[in-house]
Amino acid sequence: MKSVWDYNENELKKSEKGRIFLLERQINYGPEKGKKIKLAEVKKYWNKLHLFPNRKKLMELFI
């Protein structure tokens, strides 16, 4: 993921807080080219995500 260059992505995936952080970065800044954001993860962590206001509105329309 290009937006998390200063973090070890594999270490972040091990904890729930890390997975939420990575998901927030993917939504706010866009996923890496060729990767998709899983809808199930977005729904699972929706109440815990801290998103940009416009991105949150857009995601609400898609969900």
Image (spheres, rainbow, N blue to C red):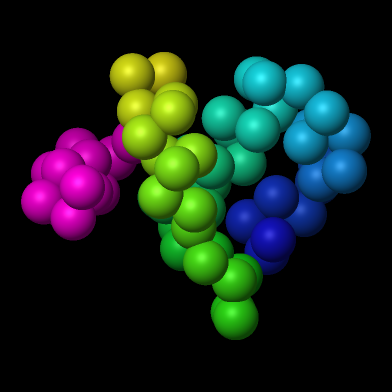
In the image, is residue 51 part of the stretch drawn in magenta?
A: yes
Q: Is 13 displayed left or right of 25 in the figure?
A: right
Q: Is 1 displayed left or right of 26 in the figure?
A: right
Q: Is 21 displayed left or right of 51 in the figure?
A: right
Q: Decide whether the magenta segment is chiefly helix, strand or loop.
A: helix
In this view, 22 is above or below 16: below
Residue at screen point 46% across, 63% down: 30
Is residue 4 among what the camera can see?
A: yes
Measured as percent of width and height from the top left, residue 44 is found at 44, 28
In this view, 8 is above or below 44: below
Return the residue nearer the eye: 2 or 23.
23
Measured as percent of width and height from the top left, residue 7 is found at 81, 41
Is residue 49 among what the camera can see?
A: no
Residue at screen point 35% across, 28% down: 46
In the image, is residue 31 part of the stretch drawn in magenta?
A: no
Measured as percent of width and height from the top left, residue 37 is found at 49, 57
In this view, 57 is above or below 15: below
Residue at screen point 79% across, 33% down: 12
Number of labelled discs? 0
Picture quadrant of residue 51: top left
Return the residue nearer the eye: 51 or 60.
60
Q: Which residues are magenta?
A: 50-63
